[in-house]
Image (tube, grey):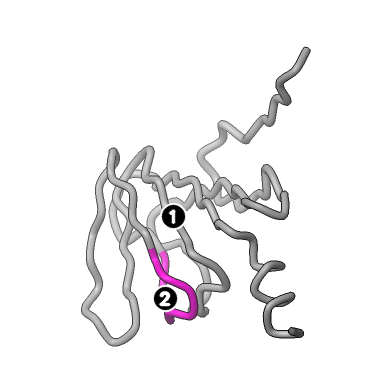
Amino acid sequence: MLETIYTYSLEDGKKVEKLFDHPHAMINHMVFPKGEGLPEHFSNSNVYMVIVRGTLTLQLGDQEPHHYQKGELVNIPYKVKMNVGNSHQETLEIFVIKAPTPLKYLEDLKG
């Protein structure tokens, strides 16, 4: 078998799980019921959010919050302040891809 299989939760409760962490890319799976999300933070890599269920409420920098739907992919540049959450009734499910991984940026800072 040449491929590697990664499994992720199929539950509706709040979940943040790292599926894959490789020097070139990191993939996380997140599930947020209404009112749930991540604490405000700065992106530590180039971030790609793939919305597979629900509506993502995302505030970047000083912008007003925007809402992104199932079937959309949002790219967030490195070092951007962000608020990620679900302000809608339907459960939000996203995959978050970081490429390169945050480790690459730490290595670049160390020089």
| Residue shown at 38% from the left, 55% from the top | 34
Q: Is residue 83 above or below residue 98?
A: below
| Quadrant in the rendering for residue 99 | bottom right
* Residue 69 pos. (x, y %): 25, 47
| Quadrant in the rendering for residue 98 | bottom right
Mark 2 packing: few (<14 Cα in 10 Å), some, or many (20+)?
A: many
Q: Quadrant of the C terminus?
A: bottom right
Q: Quadrant of the N terminus?
A: top right
* Residue 89 pos. (x, y %): 30, 49
Q: Is residue 67 above or below residue 102?
A: above
* Residue 36 pos. (x, y %): 46, 61
Magenta-drawn segment: 76-84
Q: Is residue 5 above or below residue 83?
A: above
Q: Which mark is residue 48?
A: 1
Q: Which residue, given by chain and number where applicable, does mark 2 sit on?
A: 82
Q: Which mark is residue 58?
A: none
Comparing 1 with 6, the one in front is 1
In this rendering, which labeled residue sits more in front, label 2 or label 1?
A: 1
| Residue shown at 51% from the left, 67% from the top | 38
